[in-house]
Image (cartoon, coloured by chain):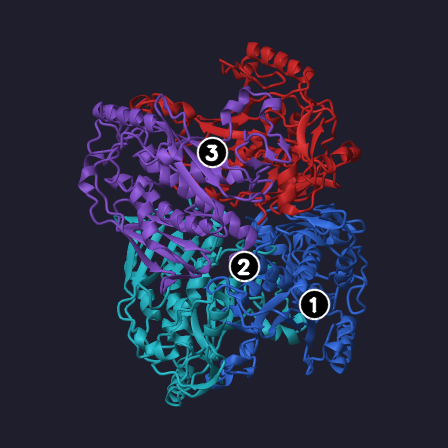
Chain colours: A cyan, B blue, C purple, D red
């Protein structure tokens, strides 16, 4: 298919453009009789919503979810859960000056090459707004996983050169969901500085899974790290992913990297909670590299459809750093992947 | 399914354990009438074969491929291509002392937790030998991609602290396929030193795709980097993957990261040849972090099935570094992914 | 997945209940740049719509399709096409007396057993209204197939004991799309008689595909007749399907059944246009058995949730025969199947 | 994919041609720790084997199954189960005179049109021998379903005009597995007569599923009858399928067809054990129409590659009726379908 679906047992199919009638998601494979907490889904949506984060864009979008099917009297029915976000206050004219230009760092050029047609309004299907459908689906998955005692939480652990040195998740009640309060202040200051310079900055998001028992993941192409990588790397701004010690393993010896074990349990977690593609029962730890926002206010070189070089200045209010609002998107993709594997292994019908 | 298949249009299904009767692969979706070069497939197999690389294990395994179906008079028939490697000289007794122990860094523990049953001989399905089926499939995919002018080549660019600073692929005719001859000498020396210390060492493999036109990859869950990440991260030893500048983007500004464009073409390639999940027509560049080999000759702590702590020394000859023999496995997974996307987009029937 | 999707290259995912907010379909895998004729889609919808057929229910439902995504300036964009039908005048109170009863011949009993929860309003997901999403998708598929010269048309060829003896499709401009005008009059009279008796009647729908070249269909599990059977047998009221001579072949000799061939072409078409699972270039002919409508106005025995036997009389206006409105549903499922196979074989990107 | 796989949770991938090196099947998704009865699998193979049935071909083929992977010490390991049949005594020269001719009723013509290449030896991938891989897989599925109390059995209920009027399965110990001893004698006599006339004859196979609880099957595209139809219609010789009263429903009234229910249970089973696509807990009953064997010894018209009309007489010993040996193939496809749905609903991991 056109790869707008993810998962085979818990299947998420998203649709919609940022400036069309709306966008949404169909979840197929959901169990019946589960009481969905809609407020909790809406709260997750707010974590991603433009305008709700002080470090993000000042653009204000409504992310009010409408449920078209799949629930009856508060319970899931086992039939497809359809959730839609209508586009009520998207302003297409913002984009009219971009009609014939390909914005650097954006999908404009490759979409045009692939499809021939291009919905220039707000990035169309490549807009960050597409991720709202993922957040809604992830919020559903999280609730079901929570019943199994599985928790998923992510945070910003690096912005530019500023690195969080603590993992105190109680301190993560800041706009970056950074588990190091001091670092979060410095990160916030840097982001505001970058914003004032009409520029953007990259970072790193870390995600952890706790409460997952040993045994999830399949040994060959369905390794847990492979499926999670597929999931997380399908988020537009992510340029890399690593598990446990990740790229640092390149300089390590086997005698240091191997997680030895005694009758008390594992002595370390360099592997990030996965052995042979299967969860080991330890905490799962992954990190994702977040590129700096492509839309910046500085003048850049680009071409138009006639391939004439031109200077482009992108107007509008954009996120100076993608991390703050992307944290919940990473969590969502991780949750969707886990529930898909869970249903595959253990079924969804009683 | 149990995730022993990869791809939906060009579908590779692998089977077999390292010490059973044999292992192999069924390729479904191959076009008909293609003249397969079997010598070229066998040459690719040799690149991975234990015993064929001076920096690898001294264990000598035969990787002679038998074709059971799908060809007639030298041409593919469009029906499943079945290729089998029979296990002729695997010695199971090597593993008898591991029968009740879980080797650190291996899949032993998680397999036992997941399946309850465990084929302890040589790692069973989690053995590196499983990748031979991938190499065979990748060799097929490469030949078909070559007809479109697409080339895929990988090499070792880091071992421990030693980093290749050149990308001169003419120099890559060394045991590490390293595109920097001086670095390759230092890497080889380090690997031999590590071997003498009964230890192992990690590294980084880089893979490049040239000749791929703009337009391959799907905008949402089928982003080119997402599918390639799934593919490459499904190789056992890989702990991370990055595209273009990868994790370095965390410290970069948008004004530096964006690949601007003039009528002459792109001015840089920080994104690694992919924009919005779709190939841009530039060279595609990815890097994979390779963990140090899990099997080492030093004493390590582990437990047995009764959870009693014990000291384990793994006998036998193992690769001190996985990079040399994994290079061709990375290429294979990349090739399989690309051909799958190609057939999906352009079909396989004339 | 929960099997609310059909097809792998042209993928149709439907959602929604008859009395929820609405129902619809996401089409993934559609090519870009195709100018969709929306009026033609709406015209197909009308062929199925309750209230539009004199031989059908007098219930009047609006089937106005809203397109949420996937089109821009009249052209498909290659991204998911989302089409929704909002439920504007469904009256749930019609069903209040059925709340705790399982209607004979309906999915009520098995839904309750499977899901535990049951949306009793109008049959929920098992309502015939679900097929409207199929008709919309089929209308899209038909337009693309027509570009290849492929036409799909179905008609009623039997109602009760009345059998159409002609295949004059010019005469099929009647409420049954029956290609035999005289037979259509008798069928219509029988249907009205059955309606007056508060009963229902079965029939047979025949579907033909013309203009399909030889070569579509896959030899083993993807035989053209197998995929078409999956598609057509997934329509609620269909109890059987046959191709060419179908069940009549049980009494035939090979010497009579085999379609011999001379340089002029095939001498007969007993096989219905498919050999070895692959289209032969002849007309494809299939027939589907349509059960009598389950909802009838006569008193029937059933049980409630406490398993107490009770007499049930179903009020409301129902179709006395399903054939007239199901003809377009059969066509739709056939069209979806063919386009999926076409895209798989020949791709969808230029 | 090329549709050589069936099922998504219990996935069967078959490969091989009748006269290549061998053919076989990879089963992915099998649970671990299940003690497979290999003798029972071999016994199922014998039911299909040429030479083992007095009413079948006199050609004698060995169907000795070799297991390449997926078992260890008698138990399934949860990894792919690979089973191969090597082609040891296929004689290719039998087919040399068919090299440039397209046999009537066979896949020769359409294979050539589709693939351009054609393995003319014994029908290649379209040979009936391909079904041996299905029988092996079905035998595995049956054993696992038996643990749930589910039994699947099929028999011949019609050959030419001779119809079994009883369903006494204790009498089915005849070469046709016909549940009516008297009818079976008449059928056998007719088949021998047809054989002596160098002709062939069609028939009907009935299959029943007992012990299946209510709740299996999915409401929309995954209706139980739809998936079973896909499965059974993918067997080469089948031209039609029907459930319960099947095509007879065309002449029935709803008041007669509906299966009413009292506190004692259902009062009838016209629907064949499925309501709304979901098993009702009643016995499931389906029938498949079997075409007369395509290979007959009489002279037939056909063309060669240059489209010159020619007379063809097919030499060799062929089945005069496909029913006797196809009974077990129908059972196998039904078993594979059910286990796939079972694993999807209830999982395969403990």
Same chain assignment for discs 2 and 3: no
Q: Say which of C201 and B95 sits in front.
A: C201
Name the chain under label 3: C
Is A201 placed above or below C228 here? below
Q: Going by the picture, which residue comes out furthest to the top?
A: D182
Q: Residue B284 is drawn in which quadrant? A: bottom right
How far across and down, in percent of the image, does residue C293 sit? 31, 30
How far across and down, in percent of the image, does residue D124 sit? 69, 39
| Circle 2 or circle 3, nearest the eye | 3
Crowd band around label 3 with a 10 angstrom C-alpha radius: few (<14), some (14–19), many (20+) = many
Instruction: Give the number of the disc on residue D178.
Output: none
Q: Say which of B44 and C76 sits in front.
A: C76
Q: Residue at x 71, y 56 (%)?
A: B136
**Residue that mark 1 sits on:** B327
**Residue that mark 2 sits on:** B345
Crowd band around label 2 with a 10 angstrom C-alpha radius: few (<14), some (14–19), many (20+) = many
What element does badge 3 sit on?
strand
**Residue that mark 3 sits on:** C286
């Amino acid at each position: 298919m056109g790869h707008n679906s993810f998962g085979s047992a818990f299947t998420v199919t998203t649709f919609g453009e940022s400036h069309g009638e709306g966008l949404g998601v169909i979840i197929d494979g959901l169990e019946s009789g589960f009481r969905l907490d809609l407020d909790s889904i809406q709260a997750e949506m707010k974590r991603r919503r433009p305008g709700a984060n002080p470090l993000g864009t000042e653009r204000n979008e409504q992310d009010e979810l409408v449920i078209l099917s799949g629930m009856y009297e508060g319970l899931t029915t086992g039939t497809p859960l359809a959730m839609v976000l209508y586009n009520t206050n998207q302003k297409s004219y913002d984009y009219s000056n971009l009609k014939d230009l390909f914005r650097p760092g954006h999908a404009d050029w490759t979409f045009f090459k692939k499809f021939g047609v291009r919905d220039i309004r707000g990035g169309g299907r490549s807009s960050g707004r597409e991720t709202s459908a993922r957040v809604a689906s992830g919020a559903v998955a999280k609730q079901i996983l929570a019943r199994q005692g599985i928790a998923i939480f992510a945070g910003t652990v690096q912005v530019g050169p500023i690195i969080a040195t603590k993992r105190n998740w109680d301190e993560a009640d800041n706009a970056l969901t950074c588990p190091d309060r001091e670092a979060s202040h410095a990160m916030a200051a840097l982001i505001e500085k970058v914003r004032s310079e009409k520029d953007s900055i990259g970072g790193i998001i870390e995600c952890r899974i706790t409460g997952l028992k040993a045994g999830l993941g399949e040994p060959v192409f369905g390794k847990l790290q492979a499926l999670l990588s597929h999931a997380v790397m399908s988020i537009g701004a992510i340029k890399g992913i690593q598990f446990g010690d990740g790229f640092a393993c390149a300089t390590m010896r086997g005698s240091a990297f191997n997680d030895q074990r005694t009758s008390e349990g594992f002595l370390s977690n360099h592997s990030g909670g996965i052995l042979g593609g299967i969860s080991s029962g330890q905490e799962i730890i992954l990190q994702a590299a977040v590129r700096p926002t492509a839309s910046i206010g500085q003048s850049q070189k680009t071409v138009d459809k006639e391939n004439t070089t031109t200077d482009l200045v992108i107007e509008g209010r954009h996120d100076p750093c993608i991390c703050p609002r992307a944290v919940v998107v990473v969590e969502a993709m991780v949750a969707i992947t886990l529930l898909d594997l869970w249903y595959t292994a253990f079924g969804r019908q009683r």
